[in-house]
Amino acid sequence: MKIKKVVIPAAGFGTRFLPQTKAMPKEMLPIVDKPVIQYVVEEAVESGIEDVVIVTGYSKRTIEDHFDLPNADLINNLKNGGKDEILRNIERIADMANFIYIRQKGPYGNGTPVLSAEPIVGNEPFAVMWGDEFIRSTPPRLSQMIEAWEKYGGVMISGVRIEDKKSLSRYGIADLEPVEGQVYKIKGIVEKPDPDSAPSNLATHGAYILPPEIFPALKGLTPGKGGEIWLVDAINVLRDQGIPIYACEIKEAKYYDTGNKLEYMKTAVDLALLHPGIGAKFRDYLKNLVL
């Protein structure tokens, strides 16, 4: 089967960005002229995804509005102002994919939004990508993962090398066995390990290709670390059932984590430098700063 659906959890409170996220979803924080979640959706669409399932919660309505068609007042304003290119760009947003929204239900944890999407996903394999982080790579990360999954099946998780040892405690770190090229078999995943006891420096996070068997595995979980329902615990259940778990180390990858203030600011600076409209002038501005 082809991977045509992606589930994007976007129901978190964004407490690290309060008070900014009191009324605005963290996934809608701007990176130059696009919200974070649009970068995630664009990667999915470039990888062949047709149905984008966004799992939302309280105060997330602006996500739905963003991926909807522009209202008549905005269309008329842009037309009257001769801003046809801007109008085409925002109309393209709604046409990227079929957008489906569902409210998260259940206990806290990153496995819960995945389970909430079961009625929409049904009995087919699907992708999961978080709504507040993304990877820039050529070809797109999810495209690389789908190519590996079509060859090996099972569960496929994106992998990125973490060079800063102290940062290993921020991620799920894999115990690996080489398979071929950029693909590794995962013997186990340790969630947020102590850096000195981490089994490798390959962080397995950010994007997943999962079989429908993940749903009964999630339903059977008891709360794990921190009293939360962890997706990695359900993946380990599938491993124990004999379903192979793989990591696809993403080639030419630049990982952007916008889930905390410092990394968000780094992301904004990096992508501003790459922006065709302001990149050169912004670079000159940075060079002239007195630090």
Image: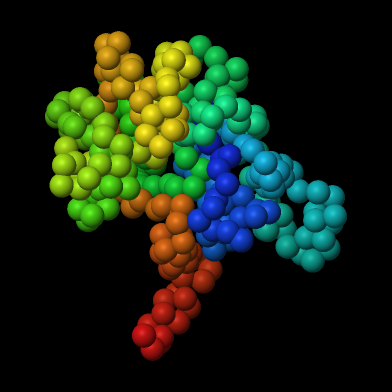
- Please provide percent x and percent y for residue 133: 44, 47
User: What residue lies at 55% left-to-right and 43% top-to-bottom?
Assistant: 12
252 or 82: nearer the viewer = 252
Q: Position of residue 9 (x, y in %)?
A: 53, 36
| Left or right of 228 in this view: 75 | right
| Residue 100 spot, x, y in % from top left | 64, 30
Q: Nearer the viewer, residue 15 or 116?
A: 15
x, y percentage for residue 14?
55, 50
Is 26 left, or right, of 24 in this rendering?
left
Residue at 45% across, 82% down: 285
* Placement of 248 over or under 63, stated as above or below: above
Q: Name the residue rendered at 14%, 28% in the picture.
A: 177
Q: Is residue 125 left or right of residue 14?
A: left
Q: Quadrant of the N terminus?
A: top left
- In front of the other: 132 or 50: 132
* Residue ranking furthest to the front: 227
Q: Give the residue at x 42% y 63%.
A: 262
Q: Nearer the viewer, residue 134 or 283?
A: 134
Residue 178 sits in quarter: top left
Which quadrant: the C terminus? bottom left
With respect to residue 51, does 68 lie above or below? below
Look at the image and tell me whether residue 257 can be seen: yes
In the rendered image, the vertical position of residue 259 relative to residue 182, given as above or below: below
Residue 46 visible (yes or no): no
The colour style of the image is rainbow
How many numbered marks have been drawn onto this rendered protein structure? Answer: 0
Q: Is residue 8 left or right of residue 198?
A: right
